Each structure stands twice: as structure tokens, then as C-alpha cells.
Image: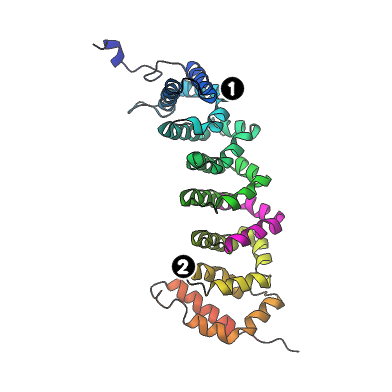
Amino acid sequence: MHSSSESIMPLFGKSHKSPVDLVKTLKDNLNILIKQKKTDKASDEVSKCLVSMKEILYGINDKEPHTETVAQLAQELYNSGLLIMLVENLHLIDFEAKKDVGHIFNNILRRQIGTRCPTVEYLCSHQEVIFTLLKGYDTPQVALNCGLMLRECIRHEPLAKMILQSDRFYSFFHYVEMSTFDIASDAFATFKDLLTRHKVLVADFLEKNYDEVFAEYEKLLHSENYVTRRQSLKLLGELLLDRNNFTVMTRYISKPENLKLMMNLLRDKSPNIQFEAFHVFKVFVANPNKTQPISDILLKNQTKLIEFLSNFQKDRTDDEQFNDEKTYLIKQIRDLKKPAS
């Protein structure tokens, strides 16, 4: 028989434990897992504590979370160092419980007090949490969980800035090429978020690190992997057409080797790659201030390009914008004049 008191909803969820007790129990059992003793019992305890924490943060059924309890839990998570401990030892935690860690992490990351974001402040002074999440892509069983938390971090400019200003940013060029499709796709989603979410920050970053970033980016455009090539081309088109990146675009479209690469990709065997290449190629052609080397290449290939573009992706009949752009480019190329000698 259950006693009737159990049916009354306690303040701290089913566990009846306060945030202080929950954090302590979770930490103790996580330490057991780290030392690999009595694993089953400790594993269950870890999972139970995580469920209770999630209930405190999200509420249960239609009960709203209790603000003071939430504040207390967040404070305990910071003070105890449990956040970094969970992230560093995610691989030791059961499958479902890993997801709970993600829910808990993302919830307290979104938490605001007035205009302050206490967890963002905490992570700014504990940068190892962010870089441990990034390194999570190296470990298949936690890669997707880490990706989810990392993207939530990137929504906050100070945390995105931390990654951009670190050499570890360049590890993305390796992660998006991972042999496991799910992990590579997830890493690309994070990489794209990082380069598109905070426009002014990113424009400044790309200007200052143009050579290093585009040397690496170039390799993605030559990738053996179709998905990587297509996504990278698409993202490149977005970056060049974003007016915050005007300086970067001007620099990119002044280089003859970049134009030659796009002309090659226009002839790729995949129509999707051709289509994404078209969107980068058009920036070279539409630029009213072409450098001489760029004009020379276009002039040298004038007849071929006009003929090629006239027959390019003719099946896209219902894509008005594409057809207008194509007509415009053909006109631009046709109107090119050889410089008076």
C-alpha cells in the first residue's frame, strides 16, 4: 500500500531531495563511475538524479518550475563544478541520461535574471566547458549530445566569440569531414551557426583571419565527400552575399584562382553542386569593379560561357529568380569589352 502522503506533489519532485542533496548524490555516484566501481547501482543513481534535476528545471506535468528551487540548483551546479564534470564524463552516462544532461545544460544556459545570463557568465570564466563540448566530436558516443549543447552556447555572442578567437576553431574543418555521416552533418550545422549567427562578430573575424580561414575552406570545396562540398559551397554563397562581409567578399572575388574553381564546379556532375557554384560564380560576374585578371578570364572564355549558361539547368523553368539571374549574367558577359590597348 502507498501512503497517502505520496500522492501530494512534493516541492522537489519525486526524489524529495533538495538541489544541494541532488548535486552531492550525483557527484558522488559520478565519481564512482569515473573510478569504475559498482557501476550498475551508481549508473542508476546518476540517471535518477538527472531526471530529478530535469523535473526541477522544467516542472512536472502541468506544474510550473519553482523559481527559487531552480535558482538554487543552478547555483549548486556552478559552485560544485558539476557542469564541467558532467560534460567531461558524458561517455560514462547511460544513453537516456546523456539526453537529460543536454536538457539540463541547455535549460540553465537560457536562464536569465533581468538582462543577465548567469550561466553564460559562468562559462566565460570556465572556458574548458566549451572546449570539452567541441572536443566531443572526437568521441562518437557523445558527439551528437555535445553538438546540441554547443549550438545552444553559440546562440550567445560571448561564447561564440570564445570559439572564434581560439585556434580550436580550426578543428571544425576536420570534424565536418568525419567519416560518420551523422557526426559530420552535426558538426557542419554547428560550424554554419558559428559563421552566420553573429554577423558583425563574424565579419570582423573573417577579415582578420582571411588567409587561414580560406586556405582551410578551399579544402572543403575540393572534398571527396559530396555532402561536404555541397554544404560548403552553399555556405560560401551565403557568406559572400551577406553585406556585413563586404570586405571579405571583395577580397574573395578578386582572386582569379577562386573564379577558376567556380567555373570548374559549374561543370560538376552533380546538378546541386552546379547550382550552388552558380550562386558564387554570379558574384564574380555581377561585380561592377572587377579586377583586370578576373575580366581577362571572363573575356577569354566569353563565347564558351555564354553558350554554357544559355543551356545551364534548363529544367529549372519554375525558378524565376534563377532564370532572371542567368539572363543577367549572360548579358554581363556579353557586354564585356577588351581593354583598349
Give the labeled residue for mark 1.
Answer: 79
Q: Is residue 35 visible?
A: yes
For the residue labelled by badge 1, is the local secondary structure a helix, a strand or a loop? helix
Pick the residue in front: 286 or 2: 2
Above or below residue 335? Residue 218 is: above
What residue is drawn where x is 51% and y is 35%?
110
Give the labeled residue for mark 2.
Answer: 272
Q: CA distance from mark 1 to mark 2?
A: 50 Å
Position of residue 26 measured from the top left corner of the image (x, y, whole percent): 49, 21
> What's under tag 2, amino acid-wise?
Asn
Position of residue 118 measured from the top left corner of the image (x, y, whole percent): 57, 30
Above or below residue 44? Residue 212 is: below
Pick the residue in front: 319 or 2: 2
What residue is drawn where x is 67% and y is 60%?
215
Q: Is residue 282 visible?
A: no
Give the class, few, some or many, for how many residues have Cα within 10 Å of label 2's Cα (few <14, many ≥20): some
What is the span of residues highlighted in magenta in the rendered image?
A: 195-221
Image quarter hosting the C terminus: bottom right
